[in-house]
Structure formats: structure tokens, C-alpha cells
Amino acid sequence: MVPVGTGRRGPERFNPTMTPPSGSPQTDLEHPRGPVPGDRIARDAAPAAKVEPRWPAALTIAAVFFLVLALPERVRLVPHWLTILSLVVLLVPMAAVTIAPASSVWPRIERAVTLVVVAITTVLIVNGLKVLLFAMIYHPKNISALSLLSSAVAVWVLNVLVFSLLYWQLDRGGPSARATAGSDGSDWLFPQMSSPERAPAGWRPAFPDYLFLGFTAATAFSPTDTLPLTVRAKMLMMFQASISLVSIVMVGARAINVLGA
């Protein structure tokens, strides 16, 4: 007597290569080998994030180096050739990020070079303020009131542009990191983040937003519509406001008084 379900060939064994009968869906649990790798990759694939345009930042960097070259010799700490070389070194990774957006190396190089150049330019700004204060207090005869006023305005504009670049690269790891990450770990709270229903879909801060942040911090001496969330953001905005206060309120006002006299 043959057992039911076995047949003459003996008990049937499960064959992993057997194709399920038509009409019965094959799921990950039913298939002994698990899901097909290609299917999982297709399900997990996401569209690449759009690269933030670099031309606003590139124009700002060009303006920064133009102002540095226009500063008087007593204020500028570096020679002309080093300033031009720094401009080229800074613009090359920005162009590479635009040309090869899928690369993960160029954004890190761009961020590192930008932060180094920003640190050097900040030292130059502080040195310029020191020279201007010396001229304001001791009235050297070789410095006119017009030169004092123009230098104070140049230092103030440099202050706005340089700190805008710093905020742009500092917040949430820089523009490339913001393109793929969420809003966690933000250094600043923009209005669009607190009211997402009023912002375009997929909005994230770009360089013009940080330029406006740097401008308002240098003119209002305090946060306006964008609030600092971290200690480093507060300290940087306080430092920028202090530079702006010294360059415009003290040096600029003194130069205007001398011109009036």
C-alpha cells in the first residue's frame, strides 16, 4: 500500500528552483531564496538631489577678492599674487561640484577650502579694523578722511560677504549635505522651516538666504527673521555684529566728522 501523496517515486522533496504555479503570487516569504536583489535596489532607489547653484557664491567670492585687492597696502596683509591664487583655488572645487554632482570628494574639498579662506579673510578684516582704529585715534597725516571712510565701507562689505559664505558652509554641513539630509541639526531656523505650508515643496536654504542673514546681522546687530539655534551660530553672529559696529558706527562716523570739518 502506497502512502497518500508520495507516489511511486517516494516522498517529494522541495526544489528551490521550482516555479510556483501560475496565479499564485510569489512573495519574499514564499521564496526560499528571499527577495531578488535587483528588485530591492529598484525599490530603494531614490531620485538624486538637485545640486545647489554655485554661481551666487562664486560672484560673492569674486567680490571679496576684488575688495581685498582694493584695500590700501597698510590694511592688506597678503600680496596680490597670493590673493589671486586663493581665488583660483577656491573657484576650482566649486566648478567641479557643478560639473560632477555625484562626486562625494569635491564637496568636502570645497567646504574645507572655503572655511580656510574665510578664516584668513577674517584675520585680514580684524587687522584692517585695527589699522582704522589707530588712524582714527592718532590721526596720522598720511591717512585722509576719505581714505578712512572708503576703507571702513570696504571692511563692512567684506564682513557681510565673508560671514555669509561662512554661514552657508557651516549650517548642517554645507550645501551638499543639506541637499541630501533633513532639517535636523540646523544652526539657524529660517521662516520657511517654522511655516512649511508657506514654503515651496522641497525648500531648503540656499546662498541668497545666508547672504540676507549676514546682511541683517551686520545692519540690525541682532537676529531678524532667522534665529540662531546653536551656540556657535550665536557666537559667530555676535562676532560679526561687533565688527560691523566698530567699522561703521565708530570709524565711519569719525571719518564723516573729519570730512565735515
Image (spheres, helix red, strand yellow):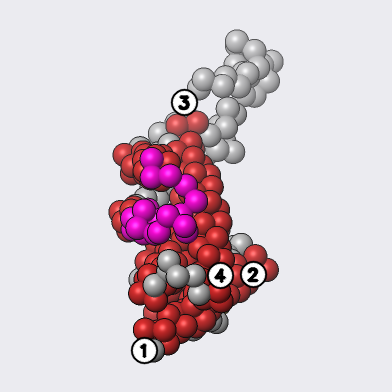
What range of the chain is rendered magenta? 63-81
Q: Which amino acid does label 4 sit on?
A: Phe
Which residue does the numbered mark 4 point to in the structure image?
134
| Residue 23 visible in the shown view | no
Q: Position of residue 106 (x, y in %)?
A: 45, 38
Does residue 67 show up magenta in the picture?
Answer: yes
Number of residues whose C-alpha sits closer than 10 Å to that of mark 2, classed few (under 14), some (14–19) or many (20 or more)? few
Pointers 4 and 2 in contact (C-beta within 8 Å) = no
The answer to whether residue 70 is above or below residue 140 is: above
Number of residues whose C-alpha sits closer than 10 Å to that of mark 1, classed few (under 14), some (14–19) or many (20 or more)? few
Q: Which mark is residue 19?
A: 3
Which residue does the numbered mark 1 point to in the structure image?
260
Element type where label 1 sits in the image: helix
Whole-angstrom CA distance, mark 3 to mark 4, is 88 Å
Asked whether 235 or 190 is in front, the reply is 235
Element type where label 4 sits in the image: helix
Q: Position of residue 197 (x, y in %)?
A: 42, 78
